[in-house]
Image (cartoon, rainbow, N blue to C red):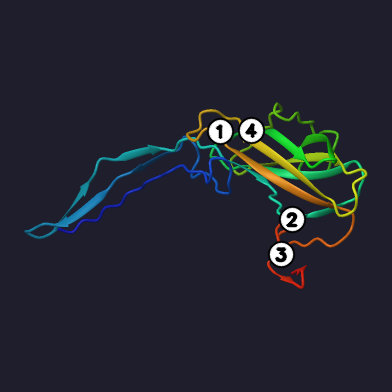
Amino acid sequence: LASLFSFFILAAFIMGGVGGTALAAGSAGTSLSNQAVGSHDNPGGGSSTTLSNPVALAIAAAAGIGVTPDDLVASGSVAPTPGILRRFLVTNLGNQDDSFRVTALTITAPATVSGVFFDLNGDSVLDAADPPVTVGATASPPLPPGGSLGVLVSYSATGLPSGTQVVLGMSAETLQPGSANGLASDVGTLRDQVGGGALFSDPANPGQPPLKTVNGAGH
């Protein structure tokens, strides 16, 4: 007896329910069906095929969110002035439309945050149409799976000496209820160096350490 069976197993899964880089598999609510097939040779010759009962699976809603960048070293140089504008990018890693809110925003003292805004047109510039964000309260527009929205942060580095590193941290959380894994959250980090001087980071991936150093210099 020779048999051949095929099976589908689907898991709607997010890498790290509290953030990550993988999109959930399939769209929420999609129904998949499968039927196993078995074939065998008959003793008197010929062959027969047997079908199993069909099995249907519905993809559950799964939440996921990613906040970038994740700087480990300084990725930019800034002057010791007010009005410095930096941008986080929040991506919906779930399998359904979802909104998010900024749940926390931190900055190393004595630097101070002066405003937070949604970058609705994605130009990384603070425009009159970019709405202000109240940390812990303002909901973003819904994002489709894989969709992203920038969050602009304005801060002041007035009076900081050259060489000071300013670290911005931002946390965001999904808002759509009913996901199989609950709400998802993630944290991003931006690092700036006040004043001039070399930035020792990976040229292909700013904010990450250089792959190697020669006599203390990044390459």
Q: Secondary structure at mark 4?
A: loop
Q: Secondary structure at mark 2?
A: loop
Q: Residue at x 51, y 43 (%)?
A: 14
Q: What is the number of the mark on residue 210?
A: 3
Instruction: Read off the residue under disc 4.
Output: 99
Q: Disc 3 or 2, which lies upstream in sequence?
A: 2
Residue type at numbered disc 3: Pro
Q: CA distance from mark 1 to mark 4?
A: 11 Å
Binning the other alpha carbons within 10 Å of mark 3 as few (below 14), some (14 to 19) or many (20 upward) gives: some
Work out whether residue 123 can be spotted. Answer: no
Q: Nearer the viewer, residue 44 or 142?
A: 142
Q: Nearer the viewer, mark 1 or mark 3?
A: 3
| Up-down relation of residue 165 to residue 55 (above or below) | below
Q: Are marks 3 and 2 in contact (CB under 8 Å)?
A: no
Q: Are marks 3 and 4 in contact (CB under 8 Å)?
A: no
Give coordinates of residue 75: x percent, y percent.
77, 55
Q: Residue at x 84, y 62 (%)?
A: 198
Give coordinates of residue 207: x percent, y percent.
73, 55
Q: Nearer the viewer, residue 113 or 204?
A: 113
Quick check: 103 left or right of 23?
right
Give coordinates of residue 157: x percent, y percent.
88, 44
Instruction: Read off the residue under disc 1.
Output: 183
